[in-house]
Amino acid sequence: MAAAYLGIRGKYVRTGLVAAPSRPVDVDLGGLEWIRAGHPVPDAGSLAAGRRALALAEQVAGDGLLVLLLSGGASAALAAPVPGVGLDDKIQATQLLLRAGLPIDRINCVRKHLSAIKGGWLAAAARGAVVTLAISDVVGPVPDDPAVIGSGPTVADPTRYADALEVVEECGIRAAFPPAALRALEEGQQGRRLETPKPGDKRLRGARTLVIGSRLDALNAAKRHAAGLGYDVVTLPAPVVGEARAAAVDHLQLAAAAAVRRPACILSAGETTVEVRGPGRGGRNQEFALAAAVRLGGATGVAGLISVGSDGIDGPTDAAGAVVDTTTLARARAQGLQDPAHYVDRNDSYTFFEQLGDLVKIGPTATNVGDLQVLLLP
């Protein structure tokens, strides 16, 4: 995004910052600063990037323009904890929220109320106009909600401290939540801390957000490519959401009901969640694929499915996802692997697919529009 923007408007750019988990070697960032920031959990680089981003925003004069190129992952890449909350507190809070398997809007509700940059604060720091160009991985409850993408650093926040505390309470992590972070949320609910900027806040009246890419763009591109290969293509319109292991079963049932001619390609996209119950290693796409493999193992005929993260990173692994087909279970048995349910229960899908050689490893793609599933019926 930064390289593309420089190619179009570079002569107007005075200074800038790029914060992301990785930097493609073939991308020219001109004179922009570069900070390697953590994802999906913030780190020291995230803290440095958050502080620098706020400093840049504060330099924008009344006749100036702040441009934010935003994508999913920015919640972790830009960290600026509120007073009284440290980086370690933010790390622990983020880990607990991610392991609870919450939808992204609920996670980001808490993040915004522990941050001095999210929830509109970045835009509030600038005196001039603010334009945000966003690539969205947010599928619901409001698709491509600007207040949720990257925790909305330049967008008014409709949620409140009470909502954030409700999230912590309802997902059962209050007892383990960092005391400093919990205290900050409680003080905010009691009116002892400033709320995030709300809709109608005068500090945000010069801010505008445009969503320039989403899962629908990925689906349309995949559809064109599959049609060019001779497949009859069906796109399932509803986003794939919910617990990954259950969503895979629902997905295959919907696909089975679709009216297609062979060879067929059934496409879907979305973003599932995983409630981490076991000590294993994996990601939502790998767990989705493993649950799908169990269903495909009992199917007649031949079918193959891939589920991948469009950013090339699935959970805390080096894989984008995994590929399965109607031979996956038989091949696993031939190699002496335990029943797939064992790996699902342990959240250990990475280990299962690593032994079969069925992990999809493409490296970071430098973009993020959620996850893509492709089901092929030859």
Image (cartoon, rainbow, N blue to C red):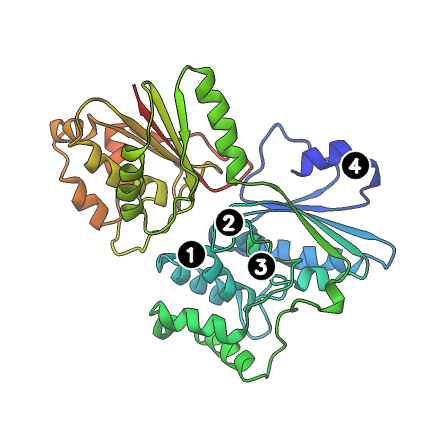
Which structural element holds mark 3?
loop
Q: Nearer the viewer, mark 1 or mark 4?
A: 1
**Residue 103 lies in quadrant:** bottom left
- Mark 1 in CB contact with mark 3 (< 8 angstroms): no
**Residue 80 drawn at (x, y percent):** 60, 63
- Mark 3 in CB contact with mark 2 (< 8 angstroms): no
Which structural element holds mark 2?
loop
**Residue 44 drawn at (x, y percent):** 55, 56
Mark 1 and mark 3: span between their CA atoms?
20 Å
Q: Please tell me which residue lies in front, 319 or 265.
A: 265
Mark 4 and mark 2: span between their CA atoms?
27 Å
Of labels 1 and 3, earlier in sequence is 3
The tag on residue 103 is 1
Of labels 2 and 1, earlier in sequence is 1
The tag on residue 79 is 3
**Residue 267 drawn at (x, y percent):** 40, 32
- Mark 4 in CB contact with mark 3 (< 8 angstroms): no
Of labels 4 and 3, earlier in sequence is 4
Which structural element holds mark 4?
helix
Task: Name the kind of residue labelled 4 in the image.
Answer: Arg
- Mark 2 in CB contact with mark 1 (< 8 angstroms): no
Dot 2 crowding, Cα within 10 Å, few <14, some 14–19, many 20+: many
Q: Which residue is mark 2?
A: 138
Question: Total number of numbered labels?
Answer: 4
Q: Nearer the viewer, mark 4 or mark 2?
A: 2
Q: Which residue is mark 4?
A: 9
**Residue 32 lies in quadrant:** top right
Q: Quadrant of the N terminus?
A: top right
